[in-house]
Image (cartoon, rainbow, N blue to C red):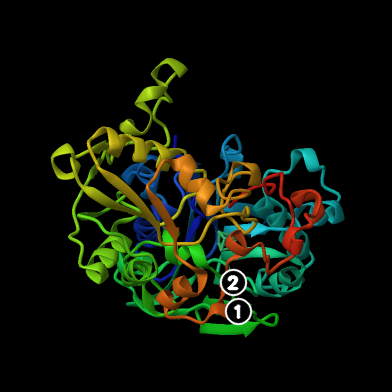
Amino acid sequence: MDDRIGEACGVFGVYAPGQPVAKLTYFGLFALQHRGQESAGIAVSDGQTITVVKDMGLVAQVFDERRLAPLEGHLAIGQVRYSTTGKSTWRNAQPVYRSTGDAGFALGHNGNLTNTIELAEELGLDLNTIGSDSDVMGELLAREYSDEPRSDGRDLEGPLEQVLPRLRGAFSLVLMDDARLIGVRDPNGFRPLVLGRLEGGWVLASETAGLDIVGAVPVREIEPAEMIVIDASGVRSKRYAEPDPKLCLFEFVYFARPDSELYGQNVHAARQRMGEELARQAPAKADMVMPVPESGVPAAQGFARESGVPYGDGLVKNRYVGRTFIAPTQQLRGMGVRLKLNPLVENIAGKRLVVVDDSIVRGTTTRQIVQMLREAGASEVHLRVSSPPYRWPCFYGMDTGRRSELLAADMSVGEIRNYLGADSLAYLELPRLVAATGASSTAFCHACLTGKYPVPIVEELAGEPNSQDGAPDATEQPLRSS
Ligand code: SF4
């Protein structure tokens, strides 16, 4: 029933001698839970030993006081993971840990490598036994790490500098050995990563909301192609490649928390501006503007503000439907979207509605919503979407399903409107969407909207190239999402 895009992963790291680093990481992961709900893990170092605790489930299910208590040290990293269905296993939970004799390291990955198979073949790994792209990255780093000659313990920095230029695709990383915390963003910076200052230490987090929760003050975003090293001597920064910023546009549209900042802009405010742009681009004669809760709320607020049409609630969301509810049998399929959403008949009966959502991926839920609103007495349903049609799969860490599953892949807007049963349908144009973010159009990846992939997709992952736009006709999922 859930046809939302699967979120990316979330990563967190803290270097803070004298502070309860495991608990800080627990809270940081808690704030990043929206980025991954399938597994959670924390690695802690006390300067001698790295201890890793990870398991399947939400942060609050994996960790309690008893599990956190022994995790003592001065630096820690953590990760919450989302993976595609059927690939959610304990083995793929993170942080990934590797030990090479007397030393070890741990890493947490948000993103998706596009050259996993190539790397695995170079390493001589059996493709059938690879756990994930992060696993391959860990193996690559472990081999470099074990070659590192150091009398006073090994340093992760040098091996990492050898490995990073070999990675392709999306990777925002937090890594640690027993003495240092390292943060890395890929040269395109597909996924966010920020640095914060904590009393007595430093914090890395996927989003500023992860800093807020532990009382850290945002310092700056880690730059694309930057490696930042935090240890007893302070913070050092290195550029390991030429940067070409291409932040995932959908972080702004949907993935990131509304209270986070991206490119210095509050995400909630940017989403409201998207709604304002949508109202200017595609106005509708209506009695009420309502969101698809909760994803469409800020854009609906912006639409109402700009259009002057009153804002109201037309659907109530059951907040407690997670990914784990029992799927209805064929017989009960009619319950469909009502497991999650129920109409407020008093608010919508006899009204012309503008219904705002941030995106339509597969369209199954949207279609049911339109039908439900009509059954509840709406006289007209005008759909407004605060992003362009989602036509291409993501290979940079989002689970969008196959291209054939994407509603807009081969349909015109008119055909989509017919399929969804709406009176009118409009998608926000790309230049207007970018304008609402306050950043430059060259600063974003928008491959899922345009088919223009900033990092080439290897053939094994993408299938045969499609003549249209020169973009790949992706029939297969990326090997694994992280
Ligand atoms: S393809 Fe789309 S979802 Fe994937 S990184 Fe680019 S903008 Fe984001």
Secondary element at tag 1: strand
Q: For disc 2, does the CB lie below 8 Å from ligand 1?
A: no
Q: Is residue 326 visible?
A: yes
Q: For disc 1, does the CB lie below 8 Å from ligand 1?
A: no
Cβ atoms under marks 2 and 1 closer than 8 Å: yes
Q: Amino acid at mark 2?
A: Val
Ligand 1 visible in quadrant: bottom right
Q: Quadrant of the N terminus?
A: top left
The reply, left or right, for residue 146 in relation to residue 220 is right
Q: Amino acid at mark 1?
A: Glu
Residue 203: x and y in percent read 42, 71
Q: Which residue is mark 2?
A: 184
Which disc number belongs to residue 338?
none
- Against 230, residue 386 (above or below) is above
Instruction: Please report the residue visible at 31 percent of the width from the left and 60 percent of the height from the top.
Output: 284
Residue 292: x and y in percent read 32, 49
Q: Quadrant of residue 217?
A: bottom left
Residue 156: x and y in percent read 66, 69
Secondary element at tag 2: strand
